[in-house]
Amino acid sequence: MPMLEGRGVTKYFGGLAAVSNVDFHIDQGEIVGLIGPNGAGKTTLFNLISGALPLSSGEIRFKGQRLNGLKPHRICKLGIARTFQETKVFPNMAVFQNVLVGAFFGRSNRVSGADATREASQALEFVGLSGMSMTPVKDLTLVNQKRVEVARALATKPELLLLDELMAGLNPAEVSEAMELVKRIRGRGITVFMVEHVMKAIMGICGRIMVLHHGEKIAEGTCNEISCDRKVIEIYLGEETRAKS
Amino acid sequence: MDITQFISTHRRLLLVGFLLLVLIFMATFPLYARPYHVRVLTIILIYVVLAASWAMFSGTTGYMSLAPAAFFGLGVYTMALLQQQLPFFLIIPVGGMAAFALAALIGLVTLRLRGMYFAIFTFGLVVFMSEIIQFLETRLWQKHGQAIIPIDNVTLLYTMIGLAVVTVLATYLIRRSRYGLALSSIGGNEEAAEHMGINTTMMKVLTFATSSVFMGAAGVVAAPSLIYVNANIAFSTFYSFMPIFMAIFGGMGALYGPVIGAVVFGYLEKTLRAQLYSYFMLGFGIVMVAVILFLPSGIAGLIPRLQARLAGMSSKLGKGGQAKQHANA
């Protein structure tokens, strides 16, 4: 049984199908990439999984349990954490407090103060932000705010992590670091599902890729299969990528 | 020994000592003050309770509630209607519970509304409560307003001291707990908070209701000195806006912000308003604009700045500076 499974997942905004009849699955231990042009429905799909939006039809199951109709806080407690495309940090709180929120409330409401503090400092160390734990998050650079989001998500002890454009807006060196970070997250036994536009990152770390276009899944496969897929090249990658790979 | 160093190492002790002094001052106040000033102190404490409990919910979550007058007025009317049936000290928790129930109901319905809509709705609640009471009085009870049997000023002062201590203590405990962390995260970014496993709706409703308990209780204690109340007096929008102005003036970043705001404003209002009514309101407006423009985090926002400046000075610090920092500790 796959860890996360979606059947006929559909979301309408008014008359527009943002996500239309998409079937997908994520297996334990995978890093799966989700790509597609802007407006393809990638973030909407994430919002459906994390409970930020209700499904119009279809169903999503996590470890066999139906997620339909569950609020985000319940889904978080089941073991799915996420980051946001436009960072959604707690701007006036210190870095450490931000991560502490995840540690205190993520999986259970009965975490002891000592456990939460330890969990939060470990998560901060894992993303390399230990040195800034007392800085207000609003004073951080974009890349560090994204790291705070990752640390905060990790502090909830997820089994599945949804990363929404972690690398957007980062310079090449930062992209390499972020790729390393994603690999280390998988190394901790956490399954990763990521939306990304940085093809180098996708090709470098994802075992499998799904392509969305106008809300529909148009292709799925390994990196090689996707980069040679006619339809994907036409719609999204363009000729150059094909030549490179 | 260096004074600033002494202050920073014994911070906790000094703070407890300072709070004890304030308590002793308030408790012995009726012994040497005129009855009028006992009244003034009681009213200031009512403002402290309203401002601190308003900041408990609105200051942390950022949901601007204009409903304090609704809960305060409910407390006043609880007192007016039950004064013959129950002893005064039992009516206080009853008034608090009535406010809790009303706030929980309103919270469940409206806390999905964000920003301006929530503010407008809570303001509507004040008007609605006032209209309901007016309707009941004219149509069912066949009378206009309620007379309330006065209670002596000293008893009211001591009750209000107790209520203010409980309110500030509750705010303090909430702020430093994980519950307070959850509330600040809702204020920071509600969607992210929800995704971190926080049941934001429940958290908001519960805090909104808890903060109104103190407002309702304050209404009960405030009622006897009003002697006569009607819907317009009990649900005056003054009780909604005053706590907000006080909390903004004092600053909501720190626990003592709303308290300082309430003390300063309450004192000025009671002493100046009687003599120079229109000038007071004019000055009030100018001061509010100045605070919002130049001190966005209120008076409390000045304190870290002052502390930094004082720490930078040498131990030649004058006596005035010492007393100032003592008060800030």
Image (cartoon, rainbow, N blue to C red):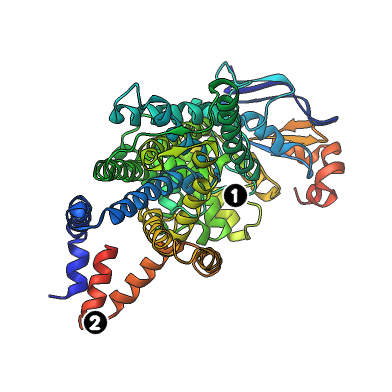
Mark 2 → mark 1, Cα distance in angstroms: 44 Å
Three-letter code, disc 1: Thr
Residue B85 appears anywhere in the view: yes
Which residue is label 1 attached to?
A87
Which residue is label 2 attached to?
B314
Position above or below: B295 against B236:
below
Q: Is residue B164 left or right of residue A245?
A: left
Number of other residues with Cα within 10 Å of mark 1, as a class: few under 14, some 14 to 19, many 20 or more = some
Q: Quadrant of residue A27?
A: top right
Number of other residues with Cα within 10 Å of mark 2, as a class: few under 14, some 14 to 19, many 20 or more = few
Q: Mark 2 or mark 1, which is nearer to you? A: 2
Q: Secondary structure at mark 1?
A: loop
Report the quarter where the N terminus of chain B lies.
Answer: bottom left
Is residue A222 or residue A198 the one in the foreground? A198
Three-letter code, disc 2: Ser
Task: Find the residue positioned furthest to the front.
Answer: B143
